[in-house]
Amino acid sequence: MKIKLTDDVMRDHTKEKAMAGPRPVVMSGPSGAGKSTLLKKLLKEFDGVFGFSVSHTTRSPRPGEENGKDYHYVTREVMQAGIANGEFIENAEFSGNMYGTSKAAIQAVQAKNLICILDIDMQGVKNIKRTDLNPIYVSIQAPSMDILEKRLRDRKTESEESLQKRLHAAKVDMEISKEPGLFDVVITNDDLDVAYGKLKDALLKEIQKVRDTSKS
Ligand SMILES: Nc1ncnc2c1ncn2[C@@H]1O[C@H](COP(=O)(O)OP(=O)(O)OP(=O)(O)O)[C@@H](O)[C@H]1O
Ligand SMILES: Nc1nc2c(ncn2[C@@H]2O[C@H](COP(=O)(O)O)[C@@H](O)[C@H]2O)c(=O)[nH]1
């Protein structure tokens, strides 16, 4: 039997699709694996396609980081009040600091019909899985623990204590990321250009959606 859709039904369906917008992208993986490096390349090459979800954190800014651009830097008290007030879609304690994605951070990107990128740890991934955000889950991994440690040390952003906490979390992360179905794609970031190519391939469909929408 052929079902004839009325104009109203068709209009509603189209509106729903337009409102749904592109799927967000969750990038996760051990600290030092190269998430920020890769997502900065994406944001630069695809200006007007991707938007970064600016998280809140209680850690101090690193040299060159900007409040409101890299993170919203807040105190524990402010962060805890926001969480208690239901302002966060997810939050986690990582390496002695609090991190969280506010609902407003995601809405700010989605309001512009951009692909919202979240850079979050494994606890964040597990928590986002319980929401209806429906992102594409990408895991970025380093080729080995030794290379990861070298990258983190060479970055010169961590104290020895923070570095050890991050390496410990990385071991857990590397194991969990093998869980079948947890991530849509797992990318080993060995050669940066190769890893970036794989990331673009994984997101091609969503990139095209945004480009098609902005043309129409
Ligand atoms: N493919 C690569 N080869 C060599 N060095 C790399 C590569 N990718 C990233 N790096 C370097 O490794 C360091 C860690 O990368 P980056 O800061 O992007 O990691 P991250 O996963 O975002 O870490 P965090 O979770 O702590 O923010 C940086 O100094 C970066 O320049
Ligand atoms: N669960 C969340 N994790 C987050 C968020 N923002 C960042 N992160 C993760 O924290 C670590 C450390 O980040 P760093 O900038 O201090 O190196 C890293 O794995 C990030 O992915 C967040 O909002 N929620």
Image (spheres, rainbow, N blue to C red):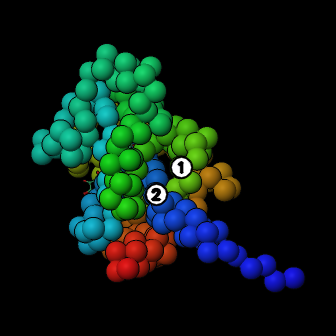
Q: Is mark 1 within 8 Å of ligand 2?
A: no
Q: Earlier in the sequence, mark 2 or mark 1?
A: 2
Where does the image place residue 12, in percent across and percent down from the top left?
A: 58, 65
The residue shown at (15%, 43%) is 66
Q: Residue furthest right?
A: 1
Where does the image place residue 13, in percent across and percent down from the top left?
A: 60, 67
Quadrant where the N terminus lies? Answer: bottom right
- Which amino acid type is marked by label 1? Leu
Where does the image place residue 149, in percent across and percent down from the top left?
A: 35, 47
Q: CA distance from mark 2 to mark 1?
A: 7 Å
Viewer-closest of 158 and 63? 63
Side of 17 where 118 appears, left or right: left
Viewer-closest of 10 and 188? 10
Side of 5 where 107 appears, left or right: left
Residue to which mark 2 is pinned: 24
Side of 170 where 214 appears, left or right: left
**Which quadrant of the structure image shows residue 153?**
top left
**Which quadrant of the structure image shows residue 16?**
bottom right
Instruction: Describe the element under mark 2 as helix, strand or loop.
Output: loop
Determine contact: label 2, label 1, CB under 8 Å: yes
Where does the image place residue 118, in percent across and percent down from the top left?
A: 40, 50
Q: Residues within 10 Å of mark 1 (few under 14, many from 20)?
A: few
The residue shown at (61%, 75%) is 7
Side of 67 where 191 appears, left or right: right
Residue to which mark 1 is pinned: 133
Residue 42 visible in rendering? no
Ligand 1 image-quadrant field: bottom left
**Which quadrant of the structure image shows residue 105?**
top left
Viewer-closest of 166 and 112? 112
